[in-house]
Image (cartoon, grey):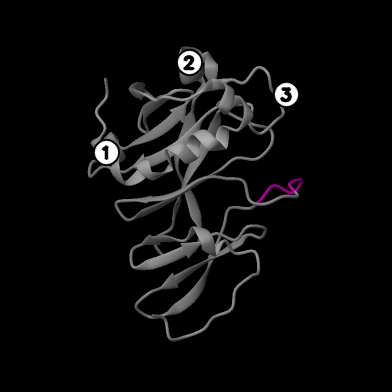
Amino acid sequence: LSGKPFLSHVNTGFGGGLFCNGTIHWLGAYNNTSFYFNVEDEELRDLPMPPIPDDWEGLRRVLYFGESRNHLHLIEIYRPPTSRFSVYEVESDYSGWFVKYNINLDPLIVAYPGMVRTYWDPSDLNYYAFSIFYIVREANDEESYMVLHIPEKAIRYSLKDGSFKKICDLDANEAEYRSSPALILLAYCCVGGFIQTLSPV
């Protein structure tokens, strides 16, 4: 139990805290500051965030927020929708974030054209049909990878060279995916802790 009360911004997402390195992290939804709480010291501190685009008026557009091997990762995507984005890693002193990996999913889209929702407007943020299950940091960072969900498949994507291969098929109803892609992600949202046990086919 924590013995010290603390104040934070009203829009801090306390429902989605992430524990890493003895610290709980919460993302600020609207502003450029988030927070982390050192469990041992019971001290709340600010965590500067990558800036939200000036023309963006909504919540932070977080595509992924996760931890692997004590590395904290963040992916954000704003308009226009893109198949190219950066994976940020938090600085060791929590002074901010730096770009750890640059991702280009274009070759994956060529192999799996169903990743493009042609029935959506290209400017819509859901134009590309993919979600990120997990970023896996290996002891040898050359072997680190990302696990993606695309319609009815789980894909292993190398963070070093962008190569990819199918891990397995996922049973998903395309009609449901069209109506609510979030439902498909929700159906598999608990795989993070077990994703490294999956074997490519």
Q: Which residue is mark 3?
A: 121
Tell me if label 1 and label 2 are in contact, CB under 8 Å: no
Magenta part of the protein: which range? 52-56
Q: Depth check: 44 or 139 in front? A: 44
Dot 2 corresponds to which residue? 112
Picture quarter with the N terminus: bottom left
Secondary structure found at label 2: loop
User: Label 2 vs label 3: CA separation?
Assistant: 19 Å
Q: Tell me where residue 190 appears, x and y as whole percent.
A: 38, 44
Q: Quadrant of residue 187?
A: top left
Q: Residue at x 47, y 18 (%)?
A: 107
Residue corresponding to mark 1: 196
The amino acid on which the numbered mark 2 sits, given as a three-letter code, is Tyr
Give me the C-alpha separation between circle 1 and circle 3: 35 Å
Label 1: which secondary element: helix
Is tag 1's residue or tag 2's residue first in the polypeptide sequence? 2
Q: Residue at x 33, y 23 (%)?
A: 168
Q: Residue at x 34, y 78 (%)?
A: 40
The earlier-in-sequence mark between 1 and 3 is 3
Estimate how packed mark 3 is, as few (under 14), some (14 to 19) or many (20 or more) residues with alpha carbons within 10 Å: few
